[in-house]
């Protein structure tokens, strides 16, 4: 190979060597950043917060099963024999004591302890074991099943080590967190991970969970989730697992929710949440189009029982777009906004009605007292004619049907007799036994009413029609296409 060829080859390889060197440097830098991001040791943090973490043992008296009944007819000559056999071999029917384990943490030096409601639910005796090994009996101050939070109190002459709540809204996905508790009865165990997700909802009305991959197992329930400053950002409550063990998907109720609940339990022994007095559902794209809304946001009112909203003039079919100065994104956001508001507070509620916004002043009630309110009813005569519309076989609602379907004696509308399984109505969940009470946000009593609403919607250029459907006492809006 000539010198010229060697120089040419060397020139070609120089960019490649520079690129490899740069890649190696980036790799080294990335490793350094990761090493710096992860704490060198969590021992100082664990030592700092451990004295405030407690194990909780509950004891409950439960009834044993009764002895099985005889297998021979009454009066049989073998009756005495089998009764004697059962008496010897039947299980003990006397009550027995059952125990369960959980976790918790002290939030004040005078002995207030936070845990999960399901840890102490129906317990006869509650024992709190401290990191030092001391044990104290605890009494229940108050519980909130909606957030699965319970507040306990132990009596002690000496101030107890405690931890404080931090602002869970500042927790970011990727932040390090430390979970502590009593997993599988092992006691005072720590596991570390990161915040995997925020604002998770499971099944509760006020859910605001922090998802973490820190190992959480049975017995961790009620224990604290710490940030790296030693502040409590969550209460370990649930895991997602096909086997019952940790697979790195755990949920902690956000501390901002817990702290509000704890303050109310400490002051009143119960929760006192604001109540607007409406039933609502999310606004979907097809519902928004049917109502002329530009965006699928807000909370659509499906029913207004007697209460604050009814007194203020809100109606079924209104879309709540703003509550007390804050825009409403969906039903979950509205429920939390209302629940966090003070009872008796006067708030301004802005709704979308008949193509424009209207604002109402509502004085909030108390949710715990208003949840049993009777749904608003409608009166009128019904038609018994039958027909098929939008893939639905319909007939007028009769008194016999009202009793059978449990929709109330004064409710009017059309009963769904059957649904074409190939129709959009079937896809959107309509089934036989549903009752359609409104179409196009107007009451209907007959098939002719429904057909009129369909024609009105077509003339207005709508592609779909909004139906108010009741299944028992539960109403919801469904938008069905009407374009040919």
Image (tube, rainbow, N blue to C red):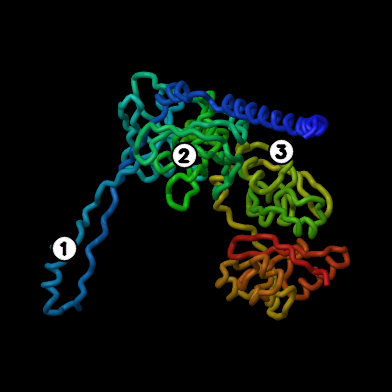
Can residue 356 be seen in this snapshot? yes
- Kindly identify the residue that appears in the image at 72 percent across and 53 percent down: 283
Occupied quadrant, residue 325: top right
Determine the CA span between mark 3 and mark 2: 40 Å
Q: Write down the residue under mark 1.
A: 89
| Residue 126 at x, y percent in the picture | 33, 37
| Displayed quadrant of residue 86 | bottom left
Decide which of tag 3 and tag 2 comes sooner along the chain.
2
CA separation in Å, label 1 and label 2: 44 Å
- Quadrant of the frame with the C terminus: bottom right
- Mark 3 / mark 1, whichever is N-terminal: 1
Estimate the spatial distance between the alpha carbons at disc 3 and disc 1, rounded to whole Å.
67 Å
Q: Answer above or below: position of 465 versus 153.
A: below
- Of helix, strand and loop, which one carries label 1? helix
Badge 1 vs badge 2, beta-carbon distance below 8 Å: no
In this picture, residue 407 sits left or right of residue 361: left
Point out residue 369 in the picture as x, y percentages from the top left corner: 54, 46
Residue 365 visible within the image: no
Which residue appears at 64% of the width and 76% of the height? Answer: 418
Q: Viewer-nearest of labels 3 and 1?
A: 1
Pointer 2 residue = 215
Label 3, secondary structure: give it.
Answer: loop
């Amino acid at each position: 190979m000539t010198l010229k060829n060697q120089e040419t080859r060397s020139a070609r390889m120089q960019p490649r060597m520079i690129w490899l060197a740069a890649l190696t440097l980036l790799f080294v830098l990335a490793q350094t950043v990761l090493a710096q991001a992860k704490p060198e040791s969590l021992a100082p943090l664990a030592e700092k917060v451990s004295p405030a973490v407690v194990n909780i043992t509950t004891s409950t008296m439960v009834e044993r099963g009764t002895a099985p009944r005889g297998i021979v007819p009454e009066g049989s000559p073998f009756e005495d024999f089998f009764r004697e056999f059962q008496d010897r071999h039947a299980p003990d029917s006397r009550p027995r004591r059952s125990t369960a384990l959980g976790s918790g943490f002290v939030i004040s030096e005078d002995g207030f302890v936070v845990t999960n409601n399901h840890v102490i639910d129906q317990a006869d005796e509650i024992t709190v074991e401290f990191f030092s090994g001391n044990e104290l009996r605890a009494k229940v101050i108050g519980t909130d099943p909606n957030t699965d939070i319970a507040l306990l109190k132990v009596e002690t002459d000496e101030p107890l080590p405690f931890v404080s709540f931090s602002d869970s809204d500042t927790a970011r996905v990727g932040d390090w967190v430390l979970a502590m508790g009593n997993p599988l009865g092992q006691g005072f165990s720590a596991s570390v991970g990161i915040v995997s997700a925020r604002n998770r909802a499971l099944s509760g009305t006020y859910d605001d969970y922090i998802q973490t991959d820190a190992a959480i197992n049975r017995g961790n329930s009620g224990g604290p989730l710490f940030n790296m400053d030693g502040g409590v950002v969550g209460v370990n409550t649930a895991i997602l697992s096909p086997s019952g063990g940790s697979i790195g998907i755990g949920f902690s109720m956000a501390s901002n929710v817990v702290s509000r609940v704890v303050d109310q339990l400490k002051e009143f022994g119960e929760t006192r949440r604001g109540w607007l007095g409406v039933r609502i559902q999310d606004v979907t794209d097809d519902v928004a189009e049917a109502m002329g809304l530009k965006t699928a946001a807000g909370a659509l009112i499906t029913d207004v029982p007697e209460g604050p909203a009814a007194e203020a003039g809100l109606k079924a079919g209104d879309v709540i777009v703003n509550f007390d100065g804050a825009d409403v994104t969906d039903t979950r956001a509205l429920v939390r906004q209302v629940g966090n508001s003070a009872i008796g507070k006067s708030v301004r509620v802005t709704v979308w009605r008949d193509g424009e916004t209207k604002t109402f002043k509502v004085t909030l009630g108390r949710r715990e007292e208003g949840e049993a309110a009777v749904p608003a009813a409608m009166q009128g005569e019904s038609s018994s004619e039958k027909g098929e519309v939008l893939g639905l076989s319909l007939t007028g609602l009769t008194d016999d049907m009202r009793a059978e379907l449990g929709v109330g004696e004064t409710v009017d509308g059309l009963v769904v007799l059957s649904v074409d399984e190939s129709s959009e109505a079937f896809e959107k969940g309509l089934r036989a036994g549903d009752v359609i009470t409104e179409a196009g946000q107007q009451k209907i009593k007959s098939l002719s009413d429904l057909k009129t609403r369909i024609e009105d919607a077509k003339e207005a250029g709508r592609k779909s029609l909004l139906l108010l459907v009741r299944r028992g006492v539960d109403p919801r809006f469904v938008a069905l296409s009407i374009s040919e």
